[in-house]
Amino acid sequence: MKNLSISLTFNFLLLFFIQPAAIGQELFGINNATIEEETIAAIYHFDHIPDFTYNEVAKKIKEMDTDMPFELNERIFSFINYFVVRNREYTKMVIQRKDTYFPLFEQAMVDHDMPEDIKYLSIIESGLNPKAKSRVGALGLWQFMPATGKMYGLDYNKDVDLRMDPELSSDAAAKYLKSLYRMFGDWELALAAYNCGPGNVRKAIRRSGGKKTFWGVYDYLPKETRSYVPQFQAMMYVIRYAEDHNLILEQPSYPIAYEKINFNQELDLEQLAAISGICIEDLEYLNPAVQNRLIPISNQFMAVNVPKSKVDYITENKEQFADAVKLTSERSVVLRTNSITTANITKPAVASTTIQSPANQNKITYVVKSGDVLGTIAQKHGTTVTNIKNWNNLSSNTIRVGQKLAIYKKGDSFQTTLADNTKSPVSSPQFYTVQPGDSLWIISKKFDGLTIDQIKKLNNLNSNQIKPGQKLKIG
């Protein structure tokens, strides 16, 4: 009996000391699953570059669903290595842009019965930048030269260059590539001809003894073209398998939803932005073919891309908007002059990133709300997008909900919202100087809560007639 007691005591002690973790977890109510989950949770690093081999890449390429010819070789593999290891920032940049432009490319390929994967060619051409310009004058997402662009309806003048219109240029590129495919009967040779011209491809075919594949004539093509097609094929792989190579965006951006509006007249984009509450930078982003913030009479039937959130407001007031945004000769001079001046500005080197408070101005802190954009925030506080970006060291127009922005206001001047004036009334009247192209309706839209009748009453106006330079009391 004594031996049995000793044995039981020994077994209990053995159990207690050998399995302390399990007993402790039971005694103190710790969930074993929780501990295991915390133990194996991975620490994620965006800069981590996973290892990969030639054979692993070859296996993935064989599994790709594509209508384009694609067989891995050392030349293509070297470009895959370049895009996923040596120049990851470039690859992340195009990944960030692709959701904006790929739907347009895919539709163009469907419309012309072409392989969808040709959409990747624009990455090699322009890095998905609709304003990209080459040293020889090629322009846009698909890098059309002036003469070739005109052949496919991409006309240009000093104010509008349709080579930078994403939709029109994508359709033109599909037509051109389709004609090259008919010429050579091979998509790789069609891509090569897009880069160096059909004459150089024909010459390479003759010098190769009549071979009619890209790799068959490879040694006889211009040096740039020998890299061009393999880069395209490498990008076909890289974008498909971006996550496998940890090419993941830390801060993804999303396309601006938009619709087209036809005013069928010459147009002042700055006025359109001012009276609709659209950020002018957003209008420029959505309409890259427009060069000087204006659409001239020669392009009067050109549609304008407008953020979807503003479409109903504009279409419901289409007649008033059409009158308000009509380009005048005075405004066309101003816009073109401003464009030239801005283009010639050389930005000085930034000596310090410290934000300096503008003289005689009061600082407020604005917390970004859902639906805010820099344009509306600037309008609300009587300043410009450029000022807000400078005050906050912003390199882009991207802001996030909850972000705090420093904004400076002059203590002795009128602020653009009547809401501010009612909260902080000032003793002296506030005035607005009429600008060329202004109307009472335009002015009322520049200031929240201000109506045409209020302006007329404040200024004893018997009609809606006003003139540039006239000072109007607005509060």
Image (cartoon, rainbow, N blue to C red):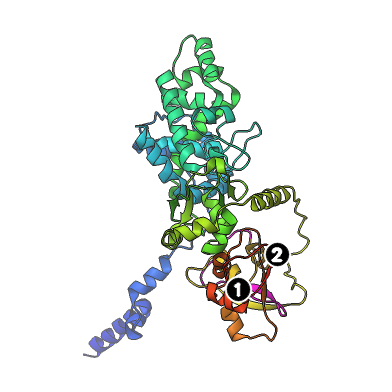
Read off the residue under disc 1.
461
**Label ID, residue 250:** none
**Label ID, residue 469:** 2
Reply yes or no: does residue 59 show up in magenta: no
Occupied quadrant, residue 443: bottom right
Give the dominant element type of the magenta stretch: helix, strand or loop: loop
Can residue 164 be seen at all in this image of the molecule? no
Tag 2–tag 1 contact (CB < 8 Å): no
Q: CA distance from mark 2 to mark 1?
A: 16 Å
**Residue at the location (59% across, 49% down)?**
294
Q: How many marks?
A: 2
Query: How far across and how far down the image is residue 133, in percent?
Result: 62, 38
**Is 118 placed left or right of 155 in the picture?**
left
Placement of 402 over or under 60, stated as above or below: below
**Residue at the location (46% across, 24% down)?**
190
Reply yes or no: does residue 411 show up in magenta: yes
Q: In the structure shown, which secondary structural element does the residue marked by tag 2 occupy?
A: loop
State the extent of the magenta-drawn residues as a range. Answer: 395-416
Residue furthest toward the left? 1
Q: Nearer the viewer, residue 139 or 412?
A: 412
Q: Residues within 10 Å of mark 2 (few under 14, many from 20)?
A: few
Can residue 131 be seen at all in this image of the molecule? yes
Q: In the structure shown, which secondary structural element does the residue marked by tag 1 occupy?
A: loop
**Residue at the location (33% across, 85% down)?**
27
Placement of 413 over or under 299, stated as above or below: below
Placement of 354 over or under 12, stated as above or below: above
